[in-house]
Structures are given as C-alpha cells and as structure tokens.
Amino acid sequence: MIAIRRYGIALVFVAVAFVSTLLLQRFFPYPFLFVFFAAVMASAWFGGSKPGFLAVLVSTLLVDYFFVPPFRTFAVDASDVAYFGSFIACAVVASWVSSSMRRTEEALRQARDQLEIRVAERTAELQKSVGELEEKERQRLLLENEKSALETERSALSDKLETRKAVDRAKGIFQRDLRISEEEAYRTLQRESQQRRRSMRDIAESVILNDNLKRGTQ
C-alpha cells in the first residue's frame, strides 16, 4: 500500500509538471527543462529511487511526445537527439541525487533517533544510579545518627551508673562516720551539692577522696 502511494505521488508530480509545461510553453521554448526536473527530484525525494526513475520514464515519454519535434510522435529529430539525451541524463542524475539525499537524511534521522534513545536510556540508568546512591547515603546517615544516639545514651547511662556508685559509697561513708541513716546521708550530700553548686557526683567523689586520704594517714 505504501509502495502504491509512492508511485502515485510520482505520477502526480509528473502530471503537475506536464500541465505546467503546457501552460508555459508559449513563454519558454523548452520549459520542461526545469519543470520536469523539479517533478523528478520531488518524486525521488518523497517516493524513493524507484518512483523517481518511474517519474524519469514518464517524463521522458511526455517530453518526447509533446515537446520535442516532431510533435505527437515518439521520434526525435537528429538536431534534437543530443538535447533530448541531455535531458534524459540530467533527469536520471537529478533523480539519483534526490533519492540519495533522501536516503542520507533518513539515515541521519534514524541515527539521531537511536542516539536520542541511547541518551534517554543512559540518562535513566544514571538517574537510577543517583537515586540508589542517594538512598544508600540516606541509610548511612540514618545509621550514623542511630549509632550516635546509642553512644550518647550509653554514655549517659554509664555516667548515671558511676554517679550512683559514687553517691552510694559517699552515703556509706557518712553513715559510718556520722552515724546517721541512709536517707540523712543522702540529704547531706544533696545539701552540700546545693551549697557548693556542684553536682552530686563531684561531692560524692570529694567525700570518697577525703576518706581515702584519712585512711592513708592512719
């Protein structure tokens, strides 16, 4: 169906050239030289090489029959043989050049389309890779944040445990030396912390240090 349409287009171009030549022949001695060339080139361009050569064949017959003396015959005067032969040769060359240019343009278009497809595929792959890298980076940062939070929590728990040990030991010292209850010993530490504006752990460590010094001098 497509081939029939291409040949039909070639015949339409030749028919337009023929009608135009009939209208222009009173103004130009050989108007077919440019009108039929245009028809042949257009046929080869839009239809391809075979429809272009069909246009050459039909144009040659029409020119020979209607526009080359003797008219209304397919004979050619000896004086016009070279001219008519030149027309045929130029028409063939014009058809070949036009179809070649068309094939070249089609090849370039296909190459461009394939390149655009490859570029699109490569771009999609790169975007996917970038997305994966971003996701991995997000996961890494999340893990680092979780690790940091765990380390902070562990450090806080460790500090609380050391503080509790020191406070318990200091309470024991107060209970032993001052002969007071555990609650009174805790309140004493708390009061010392408030008065000196130091933490309970610092006060407890000071009590422990002083106790160690006393034991060392005894």
Image (cartoon, grey):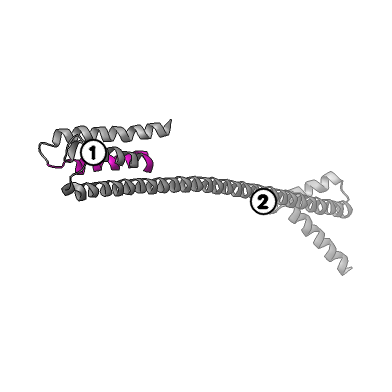
Q: Is residue 45 visible?
A: no
Q: Is residue 22 above or below residue 216?
A: above
Residue 140 x/y as whole percent: 65, 50
Q: Earlier in the sequence, mark 2 or mark 1?
A: 1
The residue lying furthest to the bottom in this view is 217
Q: Is residue 40 magenta?
A: yes
Q: Which region is colored magenta?
A: 29-50
Q: Is residue 118 visible?
A: yes
The residue lying furthest to the left in this view is 27
Tally the numbered discs: 2
- Residue situated in front as seen by the camera: 134 or 60: 60
Q: Is residue 63 magenta?
A: no
Residue 16 x/y as whole percent: 24, 33
Residue in view at x 40 percent, y 45 percent:
106
Left or right of residue 57: residue 83: left
In the image, which disc is placed on residue 144?
Answer: 2
The residue at which mark 1 appears reads as 74
Left or right of residue 53: residue 177: right
Mark 2, other Cα within 10 Å: few <14 / some 14–19 / many ≥20: few
Residue 41 x/y as whole percent: 29, 43
Secondary structure beneath label 1: loop
Is label 2 or label 1 in front?
1
The amino acid marked with disc number 2 is Glu
